[in-house]
Amino acid sequence: MSASLNIREAVQADRAAIREVEEAAFGQPDEARLVDRIVADGDVVLELVAQRNGQLLGHVLFSRLTVELPGGQRFPAVALAPLAVAPEAQRRGIGLALIEQAHRRLAGAGETLSVVLGEPEYYGRAGYAHGRAADFDCDWRCEALQAVAWGDAPSIGRLVYAPAFAAL
C-alpha cells in the first residue's frame, strides 16, 4: 500500500524541489522563473505542495489578481498559475487534489473569484468555466481563460495580473 498524499503550504525549504518539479513538468524553466518572481515580489496568495514519502510531486500557486471594474473600483481575486506535477506522477489526481485543497482554503479565507488560463477540459473538472470568464477584458482573452466563483464576484472588468506575468 502506498503512502498517502500530503498536501501542505510551501515553505522556503521547498524552493529547489518546486523549481525541479516546475521545470520537469513543463520541459523548460519559464514557469519556474514565474514562480520565483511571484514569490520574490510578495504576490503569493496561496502556494501548496503535494508530497508522498518525502518526495515533492506537485505544486500550485495562486497569486493576487485585480479586477478593475467600470468606474475605477478594484476587486481582489486570485490567479491560478502555475500548476505542475512531476512527470512520473502525472495522471494520478495530484493536480486536481492540489486545486481542490487550495479552493477550500481560498474560499475559507474569503476569496470569491479565481481565474486560470489553461486547458478547458482539465480545469473544468475543478469547476473552472470559460463562460464565467468570457466577459473579462484580458491580455490573454481566449477559450482557455476560465474562472470559478465561490461567492459574489464580478463577471466583467479588466483582469490585472501580478507584475511577474508581464515577462511571459
Image: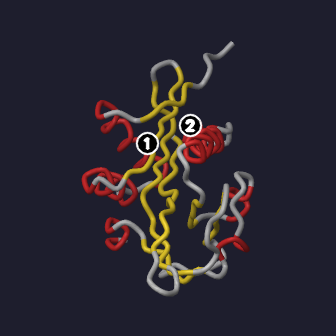
Task: Estimate how packed mark 2 is, as few (under 14), some (14 to 19) or many (20 or more) residues with alpha carbons within 10 Å.
Answer: few
Horizontal side, residue 86 vs residue 126: left or right: left
Please give the name of the residue rendered at 38% of the width and 51% of the height, measured from the top-left corner: 44
Query: Mark 1: which secondary structure?
Result: helix
Please say if 166 is above or below 123.
below
**Of marks 1 and 2, the one in the foreground:** 1
Q: Amino acid at mark 1?
A: Val
Please say if 48 is above or below 40.
above
Q: Which badge, 1 or 2, comes first in the chain's sequence?
A: 1
Query: Mark 2: which secondary structure?
Result: helix
Q: Position of residue 50 (x, y in %)?
A: 52, 33
Image quadrant occupied by the N terminus: top right
Please give the name of the residue rendered at 56% of the width and 67% of the height, measured from the top-left corner: 117
Please give the name of the residue rendered at 43% of the width and 74% of the height, measured from the top-left corner: 160
Horizontal side, residue 45 vs residue 154: left or right: left
Q: Amino acid at mark 2?
A: Glu
The residue wearing badge 1 is 21
The residue wearing badge 2 is 88
44, 109: nearer the viewer: 109
Q: Position of residue 128 (x, y in %)?
A: 69, 60
Horizontal side, residue 41 vs residue 157: left or right: left
Q: Position of residue 129 (x, y in %)?
A: 71, 66
